[in-house]
Structure formats: C-alpha cells, structure tokens
Amino acid sequence: MPKSQRDTISIRRLPTKGSTIRLEAEVTRVAEPEAGHQGLVTLRIPGHSTPIMIPASFLPDDDEA
C-alpha cells in the first residue's frame, strides 16, 4: 500500500548532529512501573511500521512540552 501524504513526514532540510526535532507519535501501549523499570511506553510514528519502546522518563511532562 503506498504511503499517503498524511503518513509522510516532510523535512525541508536535513537536521544536523545535535539538532532537536519534534515528532508526533501515537501511544499504543503503556507498561506500568515494575521492579526493573520506571514504566515503558510503546509509540507508533506514522509511516514507520516498527513500534518504538522507550522508558516513560524520556517523555516530557505536560508542563515541560
């Protein structure tokens, strides 16, 4: 299935090393904190088929965004 215009991230210029970029992602799963971790969040970036799992501590609080 071809990617739609909505599924394509448009980058006008390539970022340089150390640049900060912001991506919108859909949260598909949240794992509550357990002994081995502080909580895990699984994200899906539109147009990317592989989900990404990151520690919840990597996500900014609403006040920081």
Image (cartoon, rainbow, N blue to C red):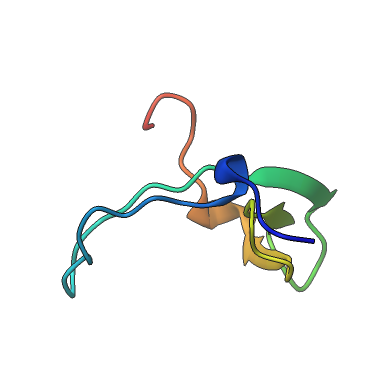
Q: Residue at x 62, y 62 (%)?
A: 55
Q: How many marks?
A: 0
Residues 42 and 33: in front is 42
| Relative vertical location of residue 54 with respect to residue 17 in this rendering, above or below | above
User: Which is more toward the observer, 65 or 44?
Assistant: 44
Image coordinates of residue 10 in percent, x first then y, are: 39, 50
Q: Position of residue 42 (x, y in %)?
A: 74, 57
Look at the image and tell me in which quarter the N terminus lies. bottom right
Horizontal placement of 57 versus 1: left or right? left
Q: On the rendered image, what quadrant is the C terminus found in?
A: top left
Q: Residue at image x 56%, y 43%? A: 5
Residue at the image position 64 percent from the left and 51 percent from the top? 46
Residue positioned 63% across, 64% down in the render = 54
Front-most of 61 and 6?
A: 6
Say left or right for 48 vs 57. right
Outermost residue, top direction?
63
For residue 49, which quarter of the picture? bottom right
Using the image, determine if residue 25 lies above or below residue 34: above
Q: Is residue 2 left or right of residue 34?
A: left
Instruction: Give coordinates of residue 61: x percent, y percent.
Output: 48, 34
| Residue 28 appears in the rendering | yes
Please indicate, yes or no, whether residue 39 appears anywhere in the rendered image: no
- Which residue ends up furthest to the front in the rendered image? 2
